[in-house]
Amino acid sequence: MATDEQSIPQERKDSYLKVEVRDVRPVPLPDGDAGEGLALCTDRGEITAILHRAPASRKGVVWVCGARGGFGGPGPGLYAQLAQSLTGQGISSLRLDYRQPNLLAECAMDLLAGVTYFEDLAHDPVVVVGHSFGGAVVIAAGAVSRHVAGVVSLSPQTYGAHMAGLVAPRPLLVVHGKSDTRLPYSCGQQIYEWANQPKQLVLYEGAEHRLAECREELACLLTEWIPATLETAPAAGG
């Protein structure tokens, strides 16, 4: 059964909508990475991020990883590849690390700080993308933020994803490999069942947890789904 939106009081949802980003400063990039290294100085601590900037962009994506954090995402270098590619479509990306990996509530707050960063730059509502543990993080954050236009949950765990029904009316895309031996694809199916429309479930035959076996198909899916979702999102303040 999908979670009833009335199960969370509006004042509680509103309290989660913003994390204060007090300052942003440049930091060195990890070796071999591309983009701009940033530290988001927030009221909850400092969050390290990598920005892929599209000139004059009003559209954005925030990407988060699994329980260990970092910037890589599923498949070798997939997040970096997609983030850089989307700049050509006028979409900026923020790849975000966690302050306290594997603590779901705090990681969701980190993601909300990334959303706030784009909101403070007067971006329209953004898409959030997460893998594995991060697949639950994006659902938890997306369910309570009005500045999220859509949610992409890749190889997700069910723990922390029970608010999937609250993502609607924003679209939810759930992707899972049918050969995942870390988190079975039944996790993705369960989250899809919890969710309300609009929702989409994509299962890849022969794909393991990191989705490396379907890397190109997944890249094509996301480079279509993300811009289409951002194109139909309401403008900031609308």
Image: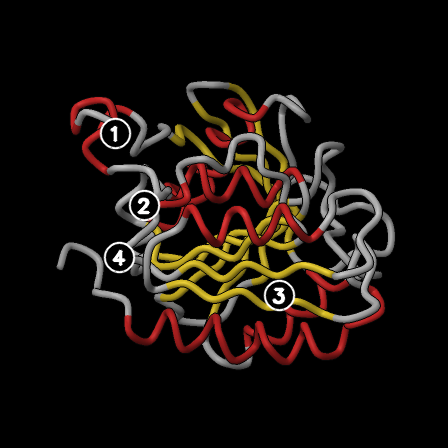
Residue sitting at x 50%, y 70%:
54
Name the residue beneath numbered marker 1. Answer: 13
Residue sitting at x 17%, y 23%:
11
In this view, the residue in front, 51 or 19, is 19
Q: Amino acid at mark 1?
A: Lys
Q: Is residue 49 left or right of residue 23?
A: right
Q: Is residue 55 left or right of residue 107?
A: left
Which of the two marks, 4 or 3, is nearer to us in this view? 4
What's the distance in space between the residues labelled 1 and 4, CA to CA?
A: 15 Å
Tag 3 secondary structure = helix
Name the residue beneath numbered marker 3. Answer: 83
Cβ atoms at labels 1 and 2 below 8 Å apart: no
Tag 2 secondary structure = helix
Which of the two marks, 1 or 4, is nearer to us in this view? 4
Which of the two marks, 1 or 2, is nearer to us in this view? 1
**Residue 235's x, y, as percent?**
21, 64
For marks 1 and 2, the one nearer the N-term is 1
